[in-house]
Every structure is written in C-alpha cells, then in structure tokens.
Image (cartoon, rainbow, N blue to C red):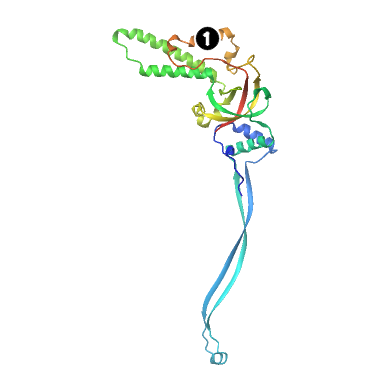
Amino acid sequence: MGKDIKPAQLMIPVYINEKIVLDMLAIMEDGFSTVSQVNYSEHKAREATQTGQMELSTSVPLLSKLLKIDLKGGISHSGSNSEEENTAKEKVHTNVSLLSKFRDFLIDKKILHTDFNIAQMQVGDYVEMEGVLQKNPLIDYMDTLIDIFHMASIFSEKPQLGNRTQAKKQTREESEMLRQIKAFTEELKHSGTIDFILSDRKGTAVLSAQEQYLANDNVSEILGGHFKVLGKVIAICRDDSESIDLLRKTALSVLPEMTLSEMLLWFKNEELSEYNLPELKTTITGPAVIVIPVAIYA
C-alpha cells in the first residue's frame, strides 16, 4: 500500500547537491544501501470446476439386463486450489526521492527552520527559504557588459573608406576591453562556485552554489524564478555594520578597497551609461547570511 504523499514532497529540483544528501542520509541511517530487495507473498485461490460427458459400451448382456444401468450421463467435480507466490523486487531511490526523504527527516526531528529570521538564526542551522533568485550582482554586471559588446559587434555599421583607420582603432580598443572584462569575469568564476542572491524583507541570503550540480548546467533556469532553497547556514551578518564580500573566493579579495574601487570604475564607461545595466557592487550589507544550498527546487 502506498504512503500518503504531500505536495511538498513532489519537488522539482533545478539544483541538488547529491553528495551532501547521500552523506547526511548515511549518517541518519547509520549506513544504508540505495538498492534493497523487497520480498512479499501473495496468496492466490482458484476455483476449479470440471464437467465431462461419458458413454460406455459393454459386450456383457447380463450387465445390461439385470442392473438396467444408464451408461450415458455426466460427471462433475468442484473444488479449490490455492498456491502462494513469492515475489522479489528491487527498490531503487533516485536523487530526488532521497532529497525528499532527507527533508522529511529534518522536519520530523524539528531541525529545519522555515522562518527566515536572521536574528534567530545560528551558524549550522538547516533552513528552508523561498523567493526570487538573482545572480551575483558583480558577475551579472560583467556578463551584461559582454552581451552588450557582442550585440554592438553584430549591429555595427560598416565604416566608410575614409574612416577605416579610425574604425580599426576603435575595434582594437573594444576588443581589448572585452578581453579584460572576460578575464575579470573568469576570475570571479574560477572556483567552480557561483553566488546566487535571495532577498527578503528580513534580510538577504547569499547562496554559495557549485555549478556542477545545476540542472543541465544552465544558470538561466534559476534566475528570476520563485524557488525554495534548502541549505545550511555557514555565516551570519546580524546588522548593517557587517557585510558579505562577493569577492571572498577570488584573488581580488586581497586588493585594498581603494584599488578595487578604481578598477571597477574603469568598467563604468561613459558610453555605457545609456544602457540599463544592473547595479555594480561587491558587497552585500547585513542583515544577511551565507548558505550552502543542498537543493533549490520548485
């Protein structure tokens, strides 16, 4: 008999850290097998009825004359046969069903905090929050710049004969700027992780996600969508006197603040002011938390 299923258990993940889920379940179960054999017996009963027609002939006249037996007739037999059938099946969990099992365990043990209240959070808490996810503002800004340069190269007009020299110079400058922007962006992503931002009226959560666990390796599936996030808190900024450095995982975090500001100012080209670029910032002011996401799902 199947168990009762709640809508929250039928989750569709766009990000799931399978290693964490398996490790936590192994701790909970004191070691476990992902494949188990389920044996059950099924009792079957069959009702059997047999009917037949018979006709006998004999060469003994005495039998016919003395007993007057009618040798034409029918015989019938009814009864029941029963048997027991044993069936063995393999029960296999998927990563999503294991995630659902892990979440149910956290809820049953009252370990999962569903109220996004930073004032009451502690480092090490398991939390479930929901909201609209955005990309790391700094990476978002750089990726948008790269897109602008690509679009400009597609729609740029061919120069007239007298302006070829000037056009070539401008093209070289734009190519150099694009190369530097790409190099700067790659530096932000080289760790294999990417920060997502989930904002709430009570504060902000910075999700330090590993790109390898994204569904189809596609960041765009997450951005702008309303999702739930299950994760573990690893850092807390209680108020606006503290902040989270979005460059903390890169070599750029060692630069003095003034040097970094001058570097970022270089990317704010006056010619780009006409575009609707996202806000360029390198810190998230508290109240805020850093969360290692176990899963992001709808």
Q: Position of residue 176 (x, y in %)?
A: 44, 12
Name which quarter of the figure residue 77 lies in: bottom right
Residue found at the far front of this picture: 201
Q: Nearer the viewer, residue 164 or 282?
A: 282
| Above or below 45: residue 22 | above
Q: Position of residue 43 (x, y in %)?
A: 62, 59
Q: Nearer the viewer, residue 46 or 7?
A: 7
Q: Nearer the viewer, residue 76 or 62?
A: 76
Q: Position of residue 222 (x, y in %)?
A: 52, 28
Position of residue 151 in the picture relative to residue 227 (left or right): left
**Quadrant that contains the C terminus:** top right
Q: Position of residue 74 (x, y in %)?
A: 53, 78
The residue at the point 61 percent across, 32 percent down is: 19
Judging from the image, what secondary structure is the residue with disc 1 in? helix
The residue at the point 42 percent across, 16 percent down is: 149
Name which quarter of the figure residue 126 lies in: top right
| Above or below 101: residue 74 | below
Q: Nearer the viewer, residue 229 or 160?
A: 229
Count of marks placed on residues: 1
The residue at the point 48 percent across, 19 percent down is: 143
The amino acid type, in three-letter code, at marker 1 is Met
| Above or below 202: residue 17 | below
Query: Which residue is denoted by mark 1 in the rendering?
Result: 263
Residue 120 appears anywhere in the view: yes
Residue 186 appears anywhere in the view: no
Dot 1, crowdedness within 10 Å: few (<14), some or many (≥20)?
few
